[in-house]
Amino acid sequence: MERYSDYDDFAQTYNRHWGSFATRILPVLDQLALSDFPTGTAILDLCCGTGQLARELTGRGYKVTGVEGSEQMLQYARRNAPEATFSNADARFFDLPVDFALVFSTYDSLNHLLTLADLSKVFRNVYNHLQTGGFFVFDMNLDSGFRSRWAGTFQIVSESSVVVVDSTYDEDEKLATMNITSFSQNQDDNTLWRRNDIVLTQRAYSVDELTKALASAGFTDTEVFDARRDFGWREEGRAFFRARKA
């Protein structure tokens, strides 16, 4: 089965330095969906990463299933959220015997789908796994976000790792590239340091493209929210989408 595995070599670094996004995004999910759904509700965390959001949701009593293409990311997710259920599968092709009241896909995970055709496969797959009346909530980097935030180099330095990130954005092709070099101690053996070099690519889609693709998949009542204007975030160019299965 095909799966998205680009994060395999990035899993340990992601778990250390990027997983905290879950606590930042949780208040947004509260406003857009969670406040209307009781504990025990079945939630799909699509592209669940290393499981920090799943941990927050299961801690509130929700029944969470995480889908992730990277088996290495899931190794951390199972440790971080032992009460959740996880499946190693691709967002375009996963097939679960459960329907969900809510599906979340966060931290611009879906920008990694590099064609509108593949992104539409994800939307149709999510629609087929949603209960009637259920909501699909996700965020995306838009063109303005890539232009403002995916340029230049930054570093993360800690006692157990050094990460250098160099980002570029091709405005004509709408493709953003992040070159990451990390040196990190193995969490199971703190005497061993390892270097990883990976390249991650995302594509910018317009709001119009995304809303039309959602409608083609069957979704109705799609609403679009600006992270800075509607939720007080500092960064520009990140949009949240909430679509309903009628």
Image (spheres, helix red, strand yellow):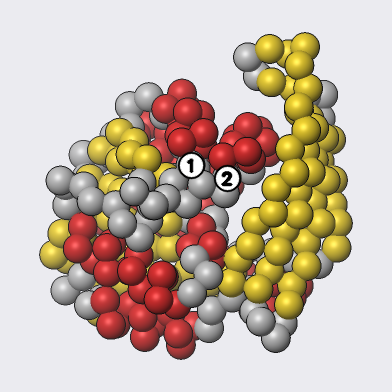
Residue 46 in sight in this render: no
Residues at discs 2 and 1 in contact (Cβ within 8 Å): yes
**Would residue 204 be found to the left or right of residue 193 on screen?**
left
Residue closest to the eye, 6 or 51: 6
Residue 202 in the image: above or below residue 36: below
Q: Position of residue 137 (x, y in %)?
A: 38, 63
Query: Marks 2/1: CA distance?
Result: 6 Å
Crowd band around label 1 with a 10 angstrom C-alpha radius: few (<14), some (14–19), many (20+): many
Crowd band around label 2 with a 10 angstrom C-alpha radius: few (<14), some (14–19), many (20+): many
Q: Residue at x 30, y 33 (%)?
A: 85
Residue 70, numbered circle: 1
Residue 99 in the image: above or below residue 113: above
Q: Position of residue 207 (x, y in %)?
A: 49, 83
Residue closest to the eye, 152 or 131: 152
The image quarter containing residue 122 is bottom left
Residue closest to the eye, 45 or 217: 217
Q: Position of residue 96 (x, y in %)?
A: 21, 47
Residue 160 in sight in this render: yes
The residue that mark 2 highlights is 7
Q: Residue at x 16, y 47 (%)?
A: 98
Report the amino acid beneath label 2. Tyr
Quadrant including the C terminus: bottom left
The image quarter containing residue 187 is top right
Sequence order check: which comes first, mark 2 or mark 1? 2
Q: Residue at x 52, y 52 (%)?
A: 25
Q: Residue at x 15, y 46 (%)?
A: 97
Residue 219 in the image: above or below residue 110: below
SS at badge 1: loop
**Would residue 165 be found to the left or right of residue 12 on screen?**
right
SS at badge 2: loop
Q: Position of residue 86 (x, y in %)?
A: 34, 36
